[in-house]
Amino acid sequence: MQIINPATEELITEIQEDTKESVTIKFQQLKAAQDSWQEIPLKSRIDSLKNFSGLLEENKEELAGILTSEVGKPLQQSRNEINGARTRIEWLADNAVKYLSDEYMTNENELKEKISYEPLGIICNISAWNYPYLVGVNVFVPALLGGNAVMYKPSEHATLTGLQIATLLKRAGVPENIFHVAIGGGEIGKLLLELDFDGYFFTGSYETGKFIYEKCAQKMVPVQCELGGKDPLYVADDVSDIRSVAVATADGAFYNNGQSCCAVERIYVHEKIYDEYIERFTEEVSSWKLGLPTEEGIYLGPLARKEQLDILTKQIDDAVQKGASVLTGGHEADRNGYYFQPTVLVNVTHEMSVMKDESFGPVIGIMKVKNDEEAVERMQDTEYGLTASVYSNEQERAEKILRRINAGSGYWNCCDRVSAALPWSGRKHSGFGATLSHAGLRAFVKPKAWHLKG
Ligand code: NAD
């Protein structure tokens, strides 16, 4: 398998993909070793994961360089991702005792009732490339804390990072054969679906998630899917500082080149402030530097995948043909590598693909709305349900709107953010199940009810 640098289109290295035989052997090794990991006291598992977090910090510059070389995100954003992953690991490790220890529900002389939390067993984690540390950590950290063994399949676009994760987990004290990496693309992912894992945890596109869910249904084991989004954001007419709202929301749409599951993908603006917002927003987008992700001060590197350049071009062509106007950008950048100009579209409608289908790139459609009611209608008009955001001076107004949106996360005066303390979950085509928070720690264990008399 060739690993290509998306910024230069140069070959970084070639790696041997797994085969049916090699993933089967890794699976059997996980199965043979899992019991011993489960038997280790929770405290020791917590220590190993905390060591892992420490190693991420110690090796941050090298790891950030590797991540940038294979996915193309600016070096500072790679560092930010590793810092963010550490925050999540710390929260999960610090809360593991609270949520994974036995709980006494009744504790009387003759009757004790308790719940214990047993590991699911061998977890299959098929993952995405856009934030390999963050979305990986969401799954394999609580899975390991809960006493499971893990087969981690990084995306074929983030293989080098996946291998680094395995090396550091071992150095951190996770024993041999408790964490394996399956190397390869969709075909290797499919092979994993043939094996008898005790739970499948997928992060990626709706199409692949649906395929995996259908394929695994017959296994009768837990399946979780964290999928894509078409996340809406509404700017109400009472915001006091339109410029700072424009700057913050532009970042929410374009950070990591818009390749975030919770990137802002559609913006609705109250008609009273629309003109000024558009002016400020476009000003901000035009001020960003696009270039080699290894250079300081670059906000936009290349996209991670070449195929996405065509998808974005088609979305923009479709929008323009149906009446949209391009305020800035609109096409690939004229240079080597998978670069696309940040693009702002106005006069958009919901007949256009750019307002319906996930763009997963530096393209945003902005639409004028008359009032909150129209904003809610537009925001709800989607097959997805990951996040939704409202900017307003009034919390009550924002919450009233967000309560009516069928999405897993609601943001008031912020967007494109994830907290380790809160459940991360999608609805509709954005998936189901939750990672992070107490719900995410408990997603990798099964409760056992104990009725103890005597
Ligand atoms: P993808 O669906 O193309 O691939 C995801 C993983 O699935 C990869 O490891 C891939 O090799 C594997 N795969 C592909 N086909 C498979 C098959 N038939 N059987 C088994 N495995 C298969 O997605 P991607 O391009 O890596 O990621 C981008 C998508 O992920 C976007 O839609 C994004 O919104 C979503 N995402 C969601 C979240 C979330 O938390 N909700 C987080 C990150 C990314």
Image (cartoon, grey):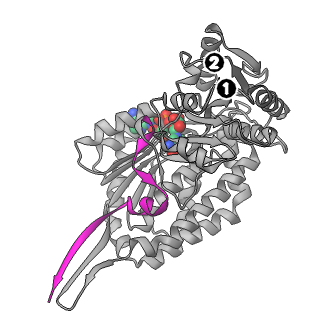
Q: Please say if the residues under marks 2 and 1 sit with CB atoms less than 8 Å apart.
A: yes
Query: Quadrant location of residue 157?
Result: top right
Above or below, comparing residue 83 to residue 113 in the picture: above
Residue interval drawn in magenta: 429-454
Q: Is residue 2 visible?
A: yes
Q: Is residue 171 visible?
A: no
Q: Is residue 27 magenta?
A: no
Left or right? Give the position of 309 relative to 281.
left
Q: In the rendered structure, which amino acid carries the disc numbered 2?
A: Val
Q: Residue at x 57, y 71 (%)?
A: 50
Q: Give how far apart the Cα atoms at labels 2 and 1 are.
A: 7 Å
Identify which residue, 246 or 194, lies in the foreground.
246
Instruction: State the quadrant of the N terminus.
Output: top right
Left or right? Give the position of 355 relative to 217.
right
Q: Is residue 447 magenta?
A: yes
> Residue 428: x and y, percent?
41, 37
Q: Earlier in the sequence, mark 2 or mark 1?
A: 2
Q: Residue at x 47, y 38 (%)?
A: 385
The secondary element bearing badge 2 is classed as: loop
Q: Which mark is residue 348?
A: 2
Identify which residue, 278 or 173, lies in the foreground.
278
In the picture of the structure, the residue carrying the numbered disc 1 is: 366
Q: In the rendered structure, which amino acid carries the disc numbered 1?
A: Ile
Identify which residue, 13 or 316, lies in the foreground.
316
> Residue 293: x and y, percent?
77, 40
Above or below, comparing residue 109 to residue 143 in the picture: below
> Residue 73: x and y, percent?
70, 41
The secondary element bearing badge 1 is classed as: strand
